[in-house]
Amino acid sequence: MPLTSFLGLIALVILGAGLTLSLALSLGVPLPVIALVAMLGSLALGLKRWH
């Protein structure tokens, strides 16, 4: 993968994460709830990888 494509992909992921956080916070979702959902999603994907 060329370096420019890789850096563009990283930039898009960071932009998407920022937009998601700003949207969730503007809708009034508390930050601990966002963190809990992120951790549960990571755990679910990790457990899926083991099977």
Image: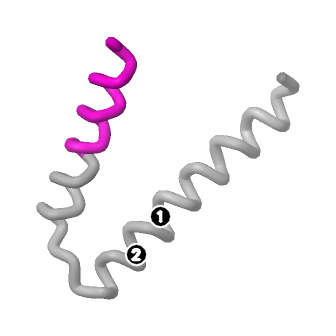
**Residue beneath disc 2:** 22
Q: Residue at x 50, y 70 (%)?
A: 19
Q: Toward which corner of the image does residue 49 lie, by quadrant?
A: top left
Q: Residue at x 21, y 77 (%)?
A: 29
Q: Amino acid at mark 2?
A: Ser
Residue 24, compared with residue 51, is above or below; it is below
Q: Residue at x 75, y 45 (%)?
A: 8
Magenta extent: 39-51
The label on residue 26 is none
Q: Residues within 10 Å of mark 1 (few under 14, many from 20)?
A: few
Q: Residue at x 22, y 42 (%)?
A: 39
Question: Which quadrant of the rendered structure holds the N terminus?
Answer: top right
Q: Residue furthest bottom?
A: 27
**Residue beneath disc 1:** 18
Give percent across and percent down for residue 20: 44, 68
Q: Amino acid at mark 1?
A: Gly
Question: Which quadrant of the rendered structure holds the C terminus?
Answer: top left
Say whether residue 17 is magenta.
no
Give percent across and percent down for residue 7: 73, 38
Q: Are marks 1 and 2 in contact (CB under 8 Å)?
A: yes
Residue 12, compared with residue 33, is above or below; it is above
At mark 1, the secondary structure is helix
